[in-house]
Image: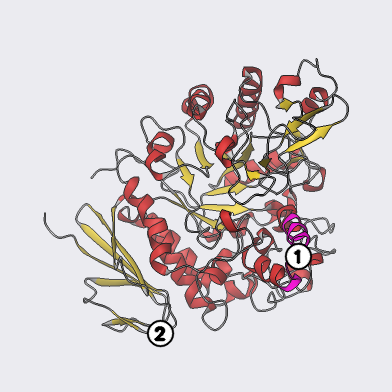
């Protein structure tokens, strides 16, 4: 196997920044672009190659920036366009590229396009959004928004309803209209011309709607039915995406990673095949949503290790020939991985390192979310007043209306709320963890005096330094990028493992996901390259131990 299909984005490690929570430079309690610039040396020392910057576009912040008011302006609280251009340039000086979020399914209801669209039934931009008359005095359909409640919002100016798959302040663009598509493509090209290296593409599988706009069948008698059946990965979506690829993506050799819920594994090649697919890679969410079943909202579902492993490795197998995956354990929409998959108490450090090994060396491009590299954890909030996320607030309101006890709701949010991953970055043990000199926009995790960057840099065996070593290991050994993937210990509920083979080398990765020592069914072959404990003991794995070994590949 040669590296004929090599590319810079395959060999990169990406660091995701949620700007509001990363670093504040002006004391207003919210992170900003100048704060990111001030931390670029830290990111360079970590060894990352790409920054994924969550939205900093002008926005009313109904959904923390994913409701865009102007694609060509920077949100005032984050800084200016000059700051943005300086960030791109300063990162490039350190060998770091920057990709931005592309939010193309919807805009803010304050975007100039929508303001004009809703101004009159015969507005020139009326068809830029999805408008429908009511039906028998009710909404056009019984579709339920992803954030709860009807997906339709009545507008008294024209007496019609507009569609919103997410918040009512996020009206969906009408991708059937070629003018809409051309304006999105022009905006993408504008940002590429200003120096960004690509896009993380938000909620892209929602852009195509069933044009029959059918009523959906309710299995539980509820008034509204989740809209996925009519607006998620619908037939015809690839026509739009291939057009985007031909007009914008293919000519530029940029990096694209798509948030693409609803794409079944059998269809993955239509999205990421290197010859005919649309994107470089996608995020799949099977492993992070094991505990969430849409059919029973608000109910936490326990999961088994075999389910977790299969949720990751099945995509490895399916993309082995000509595909590529984005590897991640947490992001701004999910909780902290060490709290979910590891042990955020006694074994926090060793289990965080174990999780890093397990996902980081699979076949794909690894993504690190801010704070993951120091083992930031979830924090139980006693009151809903501690939450800021619109999805969490809407969930709380609906569950209270249904009569669910407050304690049960808070327990669920502690396990699933997006705000668990949005607490401020913990830089030091000083005021507000060094994040701001003002009042943080959201409460800090109280463990920041002991879990922070300053302590991690000073401690030789910290999670932070372990991530640095993994980044360097992957960069140095092509087998850990391009090697074939083969899962081992498939049926074990204690051990996760796999091999990477490439040009005469075989690397073995073994991880203990439990608090007990686990015996190995066969001796670990080869030289031990990495262990996250004081020393590997032959024949077994200590609690949450991860071990990486290398040997010559067996002759075929």
Give the mark, 1 or 2, whose residue is nearer the N terminus: 1
Residue 516 got which mark? Answer: 2
83 sits left or right of 340 in the view: right
Q: Quadrant of residue 198?
A: top right
252 sits left or right of 191 in the view: left
On screen, 98 above or below 139?
below
Q: Which residues are magenta?
A: 394-407
Percent of width and height locating residue 304: 43, 69
Q: Residue at x 19, y 55 (%)?
A: 504
Percent of width and height locating residue 102: 62, 37
Q: In the depicted view, which residue is nearer to us: 389 or 371?
A: 389
Percent of width and height locating residue 544: 43, 77
Q: Quadrant of residue 540?
A: bottom left
Residue 403 got which mark? Answer: 1
Percent of width and height locating residue 261: 53, 45
Q: In the depicted view, which residue is nearer to us: 122 or 178?
A: 122
Residue 223 appears in the figure = yes
Q: Residue at x 57, y 71 (%)?
A: 339
Q: How many marks?
A: 2
State the SS at label 2: loop
Residue 403 colored in magenta in the image:
yes
Residue 397 colored in magenta in the image:
yes
State the SS at label 1: loop
On screen, 134 above or below 35?
above
Query: In the displayed image of the protein, which residue is found farthest to the left?
Result: 556
357 sits left or right of 112 in the view: left
Give the CA separation, mark 1 to mark 2: 40 Å
139 sits left or right of 12 in the view: right
* Placement of the C terminus among the 4 image quadrants: bottom left
């Amino acid at each position: 196997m040669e590296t004929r299909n090599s590319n810079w984005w395959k060999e990169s490690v990406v660091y995701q920044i949620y700007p509001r929570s990363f670093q504040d430079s002006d004391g207003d309690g919210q992170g900003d672009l100048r704060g990111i610039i001030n931390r670029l040396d830290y990111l360079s020392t970590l060894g990352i190659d790409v920054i994924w910057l969550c939205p900093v576009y002008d926005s009313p912040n109904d959904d923390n920036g994913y409701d865009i008011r102007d694609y060509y302006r920077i949100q005032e609280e984050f800084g200016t366009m000059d700051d943005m251009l300086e960030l791109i340039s300063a990162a490039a000086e350190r060998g770091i590229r920057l990709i931005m979020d592309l939010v193309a399914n919807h805009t803010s209801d304050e975007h100039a396009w929508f303001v004009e669209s809703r101004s009159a039934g015969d507005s020139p931009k009326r068809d830029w959004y999805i408008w429908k008359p009511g039906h028998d005095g009710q909404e056009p359909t019984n579709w339920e928004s992803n954030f709860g409640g009807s997906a339709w919002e009545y507008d008294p100016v024209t007496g019609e309803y507009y569609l919103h798959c997410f918040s009512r302040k996020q009206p969906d663009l009408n991708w059937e209209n070629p003018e809409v598509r051309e304006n999105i493509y022009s905006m993408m090209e504008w940002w590429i011309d200003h120096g960004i290296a690509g896009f993380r593409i938000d909620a892209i599988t929602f852009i195509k709607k069933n044009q029959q706009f059918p009523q959906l069948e309710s299995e539980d008698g509820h008034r509204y039915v989740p809209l996925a059946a009519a607006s998620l990965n619908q037939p015809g979506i690839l026509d739009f995406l291939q057009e985007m690829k031909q007009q914008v993506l293919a000519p530029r050799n940029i990096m694209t990673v798509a948030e693409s819920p609803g794409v079944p594994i059998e269809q993955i090649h239509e999205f990421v095949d290197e010859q005919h697919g649309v994107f470089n890679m996608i995020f799949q969410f099977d492993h992070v949503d094991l505990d969430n079943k849409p059919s029973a909202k608000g109910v936490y579902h326990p999961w088994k290790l075999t389910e977790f492993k299969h949720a990751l490795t099945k995509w490895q197998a399916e993309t082995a020939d000509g595909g590529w995956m984005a590897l991640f354990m947490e992001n701004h929409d999910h909780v902290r991985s060490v709290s979910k998959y590891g042990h955020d108490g006694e074994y926090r450090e060793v289990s965080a390192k174990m999780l890093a090994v397990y996902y980081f060396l699979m076949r794909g491009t690894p993504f690190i979310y801010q704070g993951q590299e120091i083992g930031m954890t979830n924090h139980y909030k006693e009151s809903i007043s501690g939450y800021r996320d619109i999805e969490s607030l809407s969930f709380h309101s609906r569950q209270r209306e249904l009569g669910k006890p407050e304690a049960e709701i808070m327990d669920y949010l502690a396990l699933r709320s997006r705000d668990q991953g949005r607490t401020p970055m913990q830089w030091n043990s000083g005021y507000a963890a060094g994040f701001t000199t003002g009042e943080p926009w959201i409460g800090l995790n109280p463990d920041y005096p002991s879990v922070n960057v300053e302590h991690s840099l000073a401690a030789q065996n910290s999670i932070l330094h372990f991530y640095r070593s993994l980044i360097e290991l992957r960069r140095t050994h092509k087998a850990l990028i391009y090697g074939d993937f083969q899962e081992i210990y498939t049926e074990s509920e204690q051990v996760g493992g796999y091999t990477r083979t490439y040009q005469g080398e075989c690397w073995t990765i073994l991880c203990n996901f439990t608090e007990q020592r686990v015996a190995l069914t066969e001796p670990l072959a080869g030289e031990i390259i990495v262990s996250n404990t004081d020393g590997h003991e032959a024949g077994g794995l200590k609690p949450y131990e991860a071990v990486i070994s290398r040997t010559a590949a067996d002759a075929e």
